[in-house]
Image (spheres, helix red, strand yellow):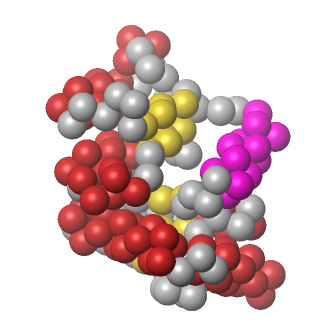
Amino acid sequence: MARFDTVKNLTGLTEWFGKNKKLQNLVNLVIVGGFFDPSKSKDREEAAEIKKMHELIEKYNLKGQMRWIAAQTDKYRNSELYRTIADTKGAFVQPALYEAFGLTVIEAMNCGLPTFATNQGGPAEIIVDGVSGFHIDPYNGDESSNKIADFFEKCKVDSIYWNKISEGGLKRIEEW
């Protein structure tokens, strides 16, 4: 869930997913942000990112493996999106090149979602790596997508691992 700015790196996350067959075999990708039609954006950078997203979906043949939901302005609907992903034992990924604070990270963790977030900025202070979520390097997509895939692999083998990270995130938010 983010604006379609280059710094938010949603197209980067999509490319990581597209390149990582192991990850694709474990989970689907849901992106929430922007418009589908680049001509609806009044921002050049956003329009370019939207075009790039369409190109990546085609390049990696992601139809049927990902869902792109337009940006949401209803806070209750956003809460439901987080909870729906949590109810299906998914995870939240915040792949920003830099994030000053990380409100979506806090929201996701507060909804019980295991969270992967950039190691560049505020989220690195919110998450205790491997305990309440995971730090990812937005400049190393292979490493980051493998870390996400490893998490879901571990969840398949250990039925309580997802709950352990979910509870770690909730506890961290309470402490924070």
Q: What is the quadrant of residue 165 in the picture? A: bottom right
Q: Residue at x 42, y 37 (%)?
A: 66
Task: Report whether residue 77 is seen.
Answer: yes
Q: Which residues are magenta?
A: 74-87
Please tell me which residue lies in front, 172 or 66: 66
Instruction: Confirm whether residue 173 shows in the render.
Output: no
Task: Relative to 20, say whether 125 is above or below.
Answer: below
Location of residue 172 with respect to 150 vertically, above or below: below
- Is residue 84 one of those drawn in magenta? yes
Out of 3 and 144, give the one closest to the viewer: 144
Image height of 76 relative to 91, above or below: above
Q: Nearer the viewer, residue 137 or 17?
A: 17
Return the residue found at the far top. 39
Residue found 34% across the figure and 53% down from its top? 25
Is 22 displayed left or right of 105 in the figure? left
x, y percentage for residue 132? 60, 82
Q: Residue at x 71, y 80 (%)?
A: 167
Picture residue at 76% right of the left edge, 37% below the top: 77
Q: Is residue 176 left or right of residue 90?
A: right
Examine the image and state in which quarter residue 52 appears. top left
Count the labels in the image.
0
Q: Position of residue 76 (x, y in %)?
A: 81, 40
Considering the image in quadrants, where does the C terminus appear? Answer: bottom right
- Is 33 left, or right, of 86 in this rendering? left
The dominant secondary structure in magenta is: helix
Percent coordinates x, y for residue 16 in the rendering: 27, 53
Q: Is 57 situated left or right of 33 in this image?
A: left
